[in-house]
């Protein structure tokens, strides 16, 4: 594996008596697509929130592109090149599609003309060409998911955290989103995605990391991970191998 772009080292996060993430470590190399999976309540979103700077770990460290993220704000982490989307799209309701993307582009390019040009190119890149002047509330759910990705791309990321960008999409929309995720890698963006659509995760990921009740229980090639008995138990509960099959 290449030197890590993102290194998570023994991070733990507690909320009162609940340990949401428990001593988790993982590495992400430049150019990888890593799927972060696990049952509901496994700690995936909490780990994403720590990576993105929503709150700090109680223990451990997260290093991105050689920079420790401890004590850094979400805005600073974004400027370093680590950005995220949200499971439930959160568009700026008073803005158009183009204005939303341009707002992110202004983080690294203060020129109105240059940021507008970048936003137009990103809209085409994610499949929102022709909707640039549309108010964001008028978009379909699939288009809002694409806008989430577009807004993240506006910040010119090195690594993007995709939080269930395929949730609620039909099969055709999932296929288009998979093409977009693969294009991100071809464009030089590293991807970590949380996703419950296992078929989609298996098709797009180089590697899977599995969390259960806050702890990492597997990390490796997708097919070997989904055949791991510990992973099968995490998803299906206790039972026989015949039951899992």
Image (cartoon, rainbow, N blue to C red):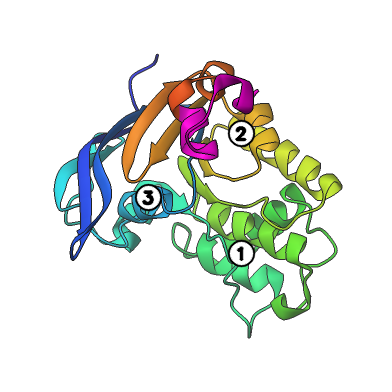
Dominant SS in magenta: helix
Task: Please tell me which residue lies in front, 94 or 232.
Answer: 232
Q: CA distance from mark 1 to mark 3?
A: 29 Å
Task: Please tell me which residue lies in front, 150 or 111.
Answer: 150
Could you tell me which secondary element the residue under label 1 belongs to? Answer: helix
Residue in the image at 35% along x and 55% along y: 46
Mark 3, residue position = 43
Relative placement, left or right, of 180 versus 209 is right
Mark 2, residue position = 187
Q: Which residues are magenta?
A: 231-245
Q: CA distance from mark 3 to mark 2?
A: 29 Å
Q: Earlier in the sequence, mark 1 or mark 2?
A: 1
Q: Which mark is residue 101?
A: 1
Give the residue at the far left of this rendering.
59
Count of number-bearing discs: 3
Does 109 appear above or below 171?
below
Relative placement, left or right, of 59 versus 215 is left
């Amino acid at each position: 594996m290449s030197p890590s772009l993102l290194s998570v080292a023994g991070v733990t996060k507690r909320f009162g008596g609940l340990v949401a993430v428990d001593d988790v470590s993982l590495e992400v190399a430049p150019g990888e697509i890593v799927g972060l999976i696990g049952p509901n309540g496994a700690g995936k979103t909490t780990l994403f929130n720590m990576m993105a700077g929503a709150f700090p770990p109680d223990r451990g460290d997260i290093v991105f592109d050689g920079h420790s993220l401890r004590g850094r704000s979400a805005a600073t982490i974004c400027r370093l090149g680590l950005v995220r989307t949200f499971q439930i799209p959160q568009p700026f309701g008073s803005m158009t599609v183009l204005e939303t993307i341009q707002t992110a582009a202004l983080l690294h390019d203060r020129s109105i003309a240059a940021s507008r040009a970048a936003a137009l190119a990103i809209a085409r890149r994610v499949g929102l060409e022709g909707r640039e002047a549309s108010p964001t509330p008028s978009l379909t759910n699939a288009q809002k998911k694409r806008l989430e990705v577009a807004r993240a791309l506006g910040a010119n990321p090195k690594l993007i955290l995709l939080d269930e960008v395929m949730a609620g999409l039909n099969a055709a929309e999932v296929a288009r989103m998979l093409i977009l995720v693969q294009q991100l890698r071809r464009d030089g963006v590293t991807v970590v995605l949380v996703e419950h659509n296992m078929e989609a995760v298996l098709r797009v990921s180089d590697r899977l990391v599995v969390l259960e009740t806050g702890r990492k229980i597997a990390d490796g090639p997708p097919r070997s991970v989904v055949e791991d008995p510990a992973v099968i138990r995490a998803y299906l509960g206790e039972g026989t191998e015949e039951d899992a099959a």
